[in-house]
Amino acid sequence: MRYFPSEFEPQSFVQLIFPHPQSDWAPYLEEARAVFVNIASAVAQYQPCLIICDDVDIVKTYFKDHTDLIYVSYQNDDTCARDCSALSVND
């Protein structure tokens, strides 16, 4: 049977899309980035965090510790991963 896994089921990582100047966060970019850094850092204490971003080198400068952070460069116009990223289906 195929199903969408619940958020409490085991997972490989959590994905975040980091705010950038072309996102809805543009008017509050630095404030939003600070919040995303806190979220990603908290996630990385328990499991890997995949960070989708427009510029990996710039985004890395926001983090002091890169342990369990995975960076992928990808152009997008949204930060809601649920709206613009792949979803998992278990079989």
Image: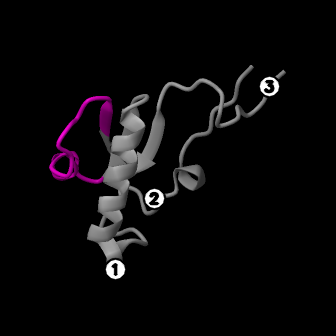
Tag of residue 79: 2
Name the secondary structure under disc 3: loop
Q: Residue at x 69, y 30 (%)?
A: 89
The residue drawn where x is 31% and y is 61% is: 33
Residue at numbered disc 1:
27
Q: Quadrant of the C terminus?
A: top right
Residue 62 or 82: which is nearer the viewer?
A: 62
Give the image location of residue 40, x and y in percent: 37, 45
What range is drawn magenta here?
54-71
Which residue is found at the position 46% from the left and 61% from the top? 78
The amino acid beneath tag 3 is: Arg
In the image, what residue type sits under mark 2?
A: Thr
Left or right of 5? Residue 63 is left
In this view, 49 is above or below 12 = below
CB atoms of marks 1 and 3 within 8 Å: no
Which class describes the residues within 10 Å of circle 1: few (<14), some (14-19), or many (20+)?
few
Of marks 1 and 2, which one's residue comes earlier in the chain? 1
Q: How is the image coloured?
A: one colour
